[in-house]
Amino acid sequence: MERTPFMKIKDAARVTGLSMYYLRNGCKDGSVPHVKSGTVYLVNVPRLLEKLDALEQGGKENE
């Protein structure tokens, strides 16, 4: 697969280990960085991983 920062939810779930349910709901409520193309959510995986790392380090979310 070509290396790209934006992935469909299924691919992002496989790469990050997060559930598709979590990613889909996060896209809908805005807590997961993404763009929407038509009906497809494309997750910005590098930004998501940075956000999760910051939360793990005890920092606040950057929005």
Image (cartoon, rainbow, N blue to C red):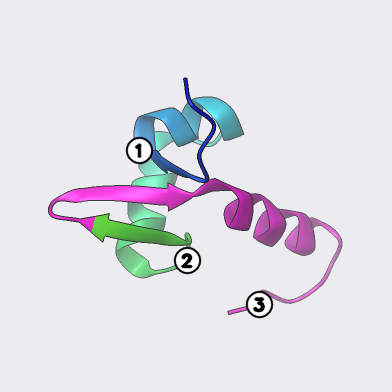
Question: Neighbour class for label 3 at 10 Å: few (<14), some, many (≥20)?
Answer: few
Q: Residue furthest front?
A: 2
Residue 17 visible somewhere in the drawing: no
Which residue ends up furthest to the top in the rendered image? 1
Amino acid under label 1?
Answer: Lys
Image position of 48 (left or right of 42) = right
| Badge number at residue 8 | 1
Give how far across and how far down residue 21 sits, in percent. 36, 41
Front label number (2 vs 1): 1
Q: What residue does disc 3 label?
A: 62
Residue 63 position (above or below residue 16):
below
Compared to 17, does 50 lie above or below? below
**What label does residue 31 carry, if any?**
2
Quadrant of the image containing the C terminus? bottom right
Does the magenta-highlighted stretch encompass residue 55?
A: yes
Residue found at x 84% / y 67%: 58
Q: Compare marks 2 and 1 and give the one earlier in the sequence.
A: 1
Instruction: Establish if 12 lies above or below 6.
Output: above
Q: Give the residue type that dot 3 points to.
A: Asn
Residue drawn where x is 47% and y is 59% of the image: 32
Magenta range is 37-63
Give the residue at x 67% y 74%: 61
Badge 3 vs badge 1, beta-carbon distance below 8 Å: no
Label placed on residue 59: none
Residue 13 image position (x, y, % from top left): 47, 32
Residue 49: x, y in percent? 66, 50
